[in-house]
Amino acid sequence: MNIQKLKYKFHSGKNSKPWYYIKEYARLYTPACILIWRGQHLLDKAKKRKDYDYILNRVNYYNKLTEDNILLNKDLWEKKAVKVAEQPMTRQKVYYLDTLEYARCFDGNNKWNLLPGDITYVEDIPTIVKSRPIHGENQNSVLLKMDKVRHFIFVKDKLSFAEKKDQAIFRGKIACKDIRVQFVEKFFGNPRFDIGTIDLIKQEWKSEKISIYDHLKYKYVMALEGNDVASNLKWIMSSNSIAVMPKPYYETWFMEGTLKPDYHYI
């Protein structure tokens, strides 16, 4: 293992997965009666907050379903919906753990359809998802904060914008990701960019993974959508660097659809 790989392994800047699993499994084995009490306590407490209207606006953004706009294929619902208490483990455990953290605060006999993964389409029944298209009739896709250990990383950036390198950096996989391929083909070798791919598409493009801290040595960080959203956008926006990206097509709990060009990103 070379020095760069060793540095990335122990100082990537990402969330600790072992610590995440310890916390989530502790919650999973907490008696449901305690979680239901705690959930109701938090809801009652929220109603007394001065920013309660703002909270409701966010809730209504994540869950756009109303009696008037619900699109329900009843046969599909009967086939796919399961009781929350009987939800099977998902292939990627984070989706199960992240949803049950909240769902177990309510009656386990309630039914839902949980769709794990990078979702870029809208189901014909109301569905809990991590990601959805921003445009069109997307109300059947109800957003929940899933795969948070990977997607929700925030940083304390010690470098001011003026102290950073005057370049835009990109590191990431590009296979089967058209926007990223087009970007690399167009700008690789341009002195205003530091570009490297971590998958082997062309040998000249290949580069090792680098830490979040190494990204933040640059004034600009590319945030290009992959399978769905750009997973690095959250930590870029919490830093003193600037996110560079096209207008997004997909959104998650981060509400990417509300971001304004030339204000939140360029």
Image (cartoon, helix red, strand yellow):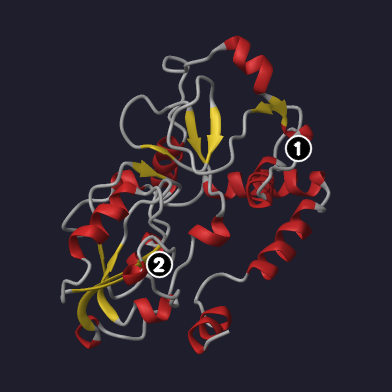
Q: Quadrant of residue 44?
A: top right
Residue 18 % position (x, y): 69, 69
- Judge from the rendering whether residue 67 lies leftward or rightward of residue 19; answer left or right: left
Please state which of residues 42 and 160 is positioned toward the viewer in this rendering: 160
Percent position of residue 239, x then y: 34, 73
Q: Is residue 264 left or right of residue 53?
A: left
Picture quarter with the N terminus: bottom right
- Local crowd size for mark 1, using a 10 Å CA cut-off: few (<14), some (14–19), many (≥20): few
Q: Residue at x 25, y 53 (%)?
A: 182
Specify whether 33 is left or right of 256.
Answer: right
Q: Position of residue 104 (x, y in %)?
A: 72, 42
Q: Amino acid at mark 1?
A: Pro
Q: Residues within 10 Å of mark 2 (few under 14, many from 20)?
A: many
Which residue is under mark 2? 235
| Between 219 and 66, the one nearer to me in the picture | 219
Q: Amino acid at mark 2?
A: Trp
* Mark 2 vs mark 1, CA separation in Å: 32 Å
Is the residue under label 1 in contact with that under label 2 (CB below 8 Å)?
A: no
Using the image, determine if residue 237 lies above or below residue 155: above
Q: Is residue 245 visible?
A: no
Residue at the image position 74 percent from the left and 35 percent from the top: 87
Residue lying at the far front in this picture: please name it: 203
Total marks in image: 2
Q: Quadrant of the C terminus?
A: bottom left
Which labelled disc corresponds to residue 88? 1
